[in-house]
Image: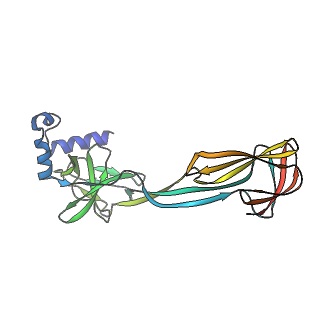
Amino acid sequence: MKKSVLLAAVLMLSGCLYAGDWSEELLGPRKDVFAAAQGHWISYYAQEPELTKSELVNEKNYHLNQSMSSPRGYSVLNNKIYRKDVYREVAVRPNKNGFLSSASIPYKFSVKDKFDLLGEVSINGERYRLVASDMPEYVFLINDRGEFYHKMGQIRSGFVILMDPDYLARPDDLKLVNVVSAKTNQSKPVQGFDVKYDGVNLDRLWFTYYEFNDGNATDGRFKKLSFPNKPGLIEINGVGIRVLNASDDKIDYMVVKE
Protein backbone atom coordinates (compact mmCIF):
# COMPACT_ATOMS: atom_id res chain seq x y z
CA MET A 1 0.00 0.00 0.00
CA LYS A 2 2.81 2.41 0.92
CA LYS A 3 4.54 1.70 -2.40
CA SER A 4 1.35 2.45 -4.31
CA VAL A 5 0.71 5.72 -2.49
CA LEU A 6 4.26 6.97 -3.10
CA LEU A 7 4.23 6.01 -6.78
CA ALA A 8 0.82 7.56 -7.33
CA ALA A 9 2.03 10.78 -5.73
CA VAL A 10 5.07 10.86 -8.01
CA LEU A 11 2.96 10.25 -11.10
CA MET A 12 0.58 13.02 -10.18
CA LEU A 13 3.32 15.51 -9.40
CA SER A 14 5.69 14.70 -12.27
CA GLY A 15 3.67 15.37 -15.37
CA CYS A 16 0.14 15.08 -14.17
CA LEU A 17 -1.95 16.05 -17.15
CA TYR A 18 -4.83 16.82 -14.84
CA ALA A 19 -4.84 19.18 -11.91
CA GLY A 20 -6.60 16.77 -9.55
CA ASP A 21 -10.15 16.37 -8.33
CA TRP A 22 -10.91 20.08 -8.63
CA SER A 23 -10.45 19.81 -12.40
CA GLU A 24 -13.71 17.86 -12.57
CA GLU A 25 -15.59 21.07 -11.78
CA LEU A 26 -13.37 23.51 -13.67
CA LEU A 27 -12.88 21.59 -16.90
CA GLY A 28 -16.20 19.75 -17.08
CA PRO A 29 -16.92 18.32 -20.57
CA ARG A 30 -13.63 19.72 -21.90
CA LYS A 31 -11.83 16.95 -20.01
CA ASP A 32 -13.22 14.33 -22.43
CA VAL A 33 -12.08 16.35 -25.43
CA PHE A 34 -8.64 16.75 -23.88
CA ALA A 35 -8.37 13.00 -23.19
CA ALA A 36 -9.37 12.20 -26.77
CA ALA A 37 -6.82 14.64 -28.18
CA GLN A 38 -3.91 13.64 -25.93
CA GLY A 39 -4.67 10.00 -25.20
CA HIS A 40 -5.02 6.62 -26.87
CA TRP A 41 -8.46 5.08 -27.29
CA ILE A 42 -9.01 1.90 -25.25
CA SER A 43 -10.52 -1.23 -26.72
CA TYR A 44 -11.76 -2.86 -23.53
CA TYR A 45 -11.74 -6.63 -23.02
CA ALA A 46 -14.80 -8.46 -21.78
CA GLN A 47 -14.37 -8.91 -18.04
CA GLU A 48 -16.28 -12.19 -17.98
CA PRO A 49 -14.38 -15.44 -18.69
CA GLU A 50 -14.46 -16.52 -22.36
CA LEU A 51 -16.62 -19.53 -23.22
CA THR A 52 -14.35 -21.88 -25.21
CA LYS A 53 -16.32 -25.13 -25.33
CA SER A 54 -19.80 -26.39 -24.58
CA GLU A 55 -20.77 -30.05 -24.73
CA LEU A 56 -23.43 -32.47 -23.56
CA VAL A 57 -22.38 -35.13 -21.06
CA ASN A 58 -24.36 -38.32 -20.45
CA GLU A 59 -24.29 -39.76 -16.93
CA LYS A 60 -26.02 -42.95 -15.86
CA ASN A 61 -25.85 -45.23 -12.82
CA TYR A 62 -26.21 -48.64 -14.47
CA HIS A 63 -24.55 -51.05 -16.91
CA LEU A 64 -26.05 -53.91 -18.87
CA ASN A 65 -26.12 -57.38 -17.28
CA GLN A 66 -24.71 -56.21 -13.95
CA SER A 67 -26.38 -57.14 -10.66
CA MET A 68 -27.36 -54.09 -8.61
CA SER A 69 -29.27 -53.23 -5.44
CA SER A 70 -31.13 -50.05 -4.48
CA PRO A 71 -32.59 -49.29 -1.04
CA ARG A 72 -36.03 -47.78 -0.82
CA GLY A 73 -35.95 -44.07 -1.76
CA TYR A 74 -32.83 -44.43 -3.95
CA SER A 75 -32.38 -44.47 -7.73
CA VAL A 76 -32.83 -47.69 -9.64
CA LEU A 77 -32.32 -46.06 -13.00
CA ASN A 78 -30.66 -42.71 -13.43
CA ASN A 79 -29.86 -41.47 -16.92
CA LYS A 80 -29.17 -37.72 -17.16
CA ILE A 81 -27.70 -35.42 -19.78
CA TYR A 82 -25.91 -32.28 -18.58
CA ARG A 83 -24.42 -29.33 -20.43
CA LYS A 84 -20.79 -28.71 -19.54
CA ASP A 85 -19.36 -25.27 -20.32
CA VAL A 86 -15.61 -24.64 -20.27
CA TYR A 87 -14.44 -21.06 -19.71
CA ARG A 88 -10.98 -19.56 -20.31
CA GLU A 89 -9.52 -16.61 -18.45
CA VAL A 90 -6.20 -14.88 -19.22
CA ALA A 91 -4.16 -12.82 -16.77
CA VAL A 92 -0.43 -12.01 -16.62
CA ARG A 93 2.37 -12.47 -14.10
CA PRO A 94 6.07 -11.50 -13.98
CA ASN A 95 8.50 -14.05 -15.43
CA LYS A 96 10.88 -13.26 -12.56
CA ASN A 97 11.37 -10.92 -9.62
CA GLY A 98 12.31 -7.40 -10.68
CA PHE A 99 11.24 -3.80 -10.80
CA LEU A 100 10.53 -0.85 -13.07
CA SER A 101 13.23 1.72 -12.45
CA SER A 102 12.81 5.47 -12.85
CA ALA A 103 14.18 8.70 -11.44
CA SER A 104 11.47 8.46 -8.82
CA ILE A 105 10.01 5.49 -6.93
CA PRO A 106 10.66 2.03 -8.48
CA TYR A 107 7.75 -0.38 -8.86
CA LYS A 108 8.65 -3.86 -7.61
CA PHE A 109 7.38 -7.12 -9.11
CA SER A 110 7.31 -10.62 -7.66
CA VAL A 111 6.75 -13.87 -9.53
CA LYS A 112 3.87 -14.41 -7.08
CA ASP A 113 2.02 -11.36 -8.44
CA LYS A 114 -0.89 -11.74 -10.84
CA PHE A 115 -2.45 -8.90 -12.86
CA ASP A 116 -5.68 -8.52 -14.79
CA LEU A 117 -5.79 -7.37 -18.41
CA LEU A 118 -8.22 -4.50 -18.98
CA GLY A 119 -7.98 -3.85 -22.70
CA GLU A 120 -5.57 -2.63 -25.37
CA VAL A 121 -4.43 0.50 -27.18
CA SER A 122 -2.41 1.21 -30.30
CA ILE A 123 0.70 3.40 -30.02
CA ASN A 124 2.62 4.15 -33.22
CA GLY A 125 0.95 1.21 -34.89
CA GLU A 126 1.88 -1.32 -32.18
CA ARG A 127 -0.61 -3.02 -29.90
CA TYR A 128 -0.16 -2.63 -26.16
CA ARG A 129 -2.22 -4.44 -23.56
CA LEU A 130 -3.27 -2.57 -20.44
CA VAL A 131 -2.33 -4.24 -17.17
CA ALA A 132 -4.18 -3.20 -14.02
CA SER A 133 -1.88 -1.96 -11.26
CA ASP A 134 -2.82 -1.73 -7.59
CA MET A 135 -3.46 2.00 -8.08
CA PRO A 136 -6.92 2.88 -9.41
CA GLU A 137 -6.89 4.25 -12.99
CA TYR A 138 -3.13 3.65 -13.47
CA VAL A 139 -1.96 0.89 -15.81
CA PHE A 140 1.19 -0.72 -17.15
CA LEU A 141 1.45 -1.19 -20.90
CA ILE A 142 2.97 -4.34 -22.42
CA ASN A 143 3.43 -5.37 -26.04
CA ASP A 144 2.54 -8.79 -27.48
CA ARG A 145 5.85 -10.18 -26.19
CA GLY A 146 5.04 -9.05 -22.66
CA GLU A 147 7.71 -6.32 -22.68
CA PHE A 148 6.98 -3.10 -20.81
CA TYR A 149 6.35 0.21 -22.55
CA HIS A 150 8.63 2.88 -21.07
CA LYS A 151 5.75 4.85 -19.57
CA MET A 152 2.77 4.07 -17.38
CA GLY A 153 -0.67 5.29 -18.31
CA GLN A 154 -3.70 6.79 -16.65
CA ILE A 155 -7.22 5.90 -17.77
CA ARG A 156 -9.41 8.93 -18.43
CA SER A 157 -12.81 8.91 -20.19
CA GLY A 158 -12.07 5.75 -22.17
CA PHE A 159 -8.55 6.83 -23.17
CA VAL A 160 -5.05 6.18 -21.81
CA ILE A 161 -2.95 9.26 -21.09
CA LEU A 162 0.79 8.51 -21.00
CA MET A 163 2.50 9.83 -17.87
CA ASP A 164 5.79 11.76 -17.88
CA PRO A 165 8.21 9.50 -15.95
CA ASP A 166 10.20 7.00 -18.02
CA TYR A 167 10.61 3.48 -16.65
CA LEU A 168 13.17 0.79 -17.47
CA ALA A 169 12.71 -2.88 -16.67
CA ARG A 170 15.30 -4.37 -14.32
CA PRO A 171 16.56 -6.93 -15.08
CA ASP A 172 16.36 -6.18 -18.80
CA ASP A 173 14.43 -9.36 -19.59
CA LEU A 174 11.71 -8.72 -17.00
CA LYS A 175 8.31 -9.05 -18.66
CA LEU A 176 4.77 -10.17 -18.00
CA VAL A 177 3.74 -13.59 -19.33
CA ASN A 178 0.25 -15.00 -19.87
CA VAL A 179 -1.40 -17.11 -17.21
CA VAL A 180 -4.33 -19.08 -18.65
CA SER A 181 -6.83 -20.67 -16.28
CA ALA A 182 -9.85 -22.80 -17.12
CA LYS A 183 -13.12 -23.19 -15.23
CA THR A 184 -15.87 -25.71 -15.88
CA ASN A 185 -19.55 -25.19 -15.09
CA GLN A 186 -22.00 -28.05 -15.26
CA SER A 187 -25.70 -27.31 -15.64
CA LYS A 188 -28.64 -29.00 -14.06
CA PRO A 189 -29.91 -31.96 -16.13
CA VAL A 190 -31.23 -30.83 -19.51
CA GLN A 191 -32.58 -34.22 -20.55
CA GLY A 192 -33.05 -37.70 -19.09
CA PHE A 193 -34.92 -39.42 -16.31
CA ASP A 194 -34.59 -40.76 -12.77
CA VAL A 195 -36.42 -43.76 -11.33
CA LYS A 196 -36.51 -44.27 -7.55
CA TYR A 197 -37.66 -47.39 -5.72
CA ASP A 198 -40.65 -46.77 -3.41
CA GLY A 199 -41.01 -50.22 -1.84
CA VAL A 200 -43.86 -52.72 -1.79
CA ASN A 201 -47.54 -51.95 -1.27
CA LEU A 202 -50.59 -54.15 -1.95
CA ASP A 203 -48.23 -56.81 -3.31
CA ARG A 204 -46.95 -54.49 -5.99
CA LEU A 205 -43.53 -52.89 -6.59
CA TRP A 206 -43.75 -49.10 -6.65
CA PHE A 207 -41.48 -46.62 -8.36
CA THR A 208 -41.41 -42.84 -8.81
CA TYR A 209 -40.48 -41.81 -12.35
CA TYR A 210 -39.15 -38.29 -12.93
CA GLU A 211 -38.43 -36.96 -16.41
CA PHE A 212 -36.26 -33.87 -16.91
CA ASN A 213 -37.74 -31.41 -19.34
CA ASP A 214 -36.33 -28.62 -21.57
CA GLY A 215 -33.13 -28.00 -19.64
CA ASN A 216 -34.92 -27.06 -16.43
CA ALA A 217 -34.53 -29.61 -13.64
CA THR A 218 -37.47 -28.05 -11.79
CA ASP A 219 -39.78 -28.32 -14.83
CA GLY A 220 -39.95 -32.08 -15.24
CA ARG A 221 -42.88 -34.35 -14.56
CA PHE A 222 -43.49 -37.04 -11.95
CA LYS A 223 -45.52 -40.18 -12.22
CA LYS A 224 -45.99 -43.29 -10.09
CA LEU A 225 -45.38 -46.71 -11.63
CA SER A 226 -46.24 -50.12 -10.21
CA PHE A 227 -45.66 -53.76 -11.20
CA PRO A 228 -46.58 -57.12 -9.67
CA ASN A 229 -44.25 -58.10 -6.82
CA LYS A 230 -42.58 -61.10 -8.38
CA PRO A 231 -39.25 -61.89 -10.06
CA GLY A 232 -39.23 -61.26 -13.79
CA LEU A 233 -38.83 -58.65 -16.49
CA ILE A 234 -40.31 -55.15 -16.28
CA GLU A 235 -39.74 -52.16 -18.57
CA ILE A 236 -39.45 -48.48 -17.62
CA ASN A 237 -38.95 -45.83 -20.30
CA GLY A 238 -37.64 -48.43 -22.73
CA VAL A 239 -35.14 -49.87 -20.26
CA GLY A 240 -35.61 -53.57 -19.47
CA ILE A 241 -35.07 -54.56 -15.83
CA ARG A 242 -34.97 -58.12 -14.51
CA VAL A 243 -36.18 -58.12 -10.91
CA LEU A 244 -34.16 -60.67 -8.94
CA ASN A 245 -35.61 -60.06 -5.49
CA ALA A 246 -37.64 -57.27 -3.87
CA SER A 247 -38.82 -56.32 -0.39
CA ASP A 248 -40.21 -53.15 1.10
CA ASP A 249 -36.67 -52.13 2.05
CA LYS A 250 -34.73 -52.77 -1.19
CA ILE A 251 -34.75 -54.23 -4.66
CA ASP A 252 -32.14 -56.47 -6.34
CA TYR A 253 -32.16 -56.23 -10.11
CA MET A 254 -30.24 -56.33 -13.40
CA VAL A 255 -30.59 -54.06 -16.45
CA VAL A 256 -30.86 -56.31 -19.50
CA LYS A 257 -32.01 -53.87 -22.20
CA GLU A 258 -31.66 -50.15 -22.92
Please state which of residues 140 and 51 is positioned toward the viewer in this rendering: 51
User: Residue 252 location in percent, x, y?
Assistant: 85, 53
Figure coloring: rainbow
Image check: 181 left or right of 206? left
Q: Is residue 233 above or below residue 10?
A: below
Q: Is residue 177 above or below residue 202?
A: below
Q: In which quarter of the image is the N terminus?
A: top left
Q: In which quarter of the image is the C terminus?
A: bottom right
Image check: 177 left or right of 210? left
User: Residue 47 location in percent, x, y?
Assistant: 36, 50
Residue 145: image quadrant is bottom left
Camera sees residue 95:
no
The residue under the point 76% across, 43% down is 73
The residue under the point 25% across, 63% down is 127
Image check: 135 left or right of 179? left
The residue under the point 14% across, 33% down is 22
Camera sees residue 213:
yes
User: Residue 101 location in percent, x, y?
Assistant: 25, 54
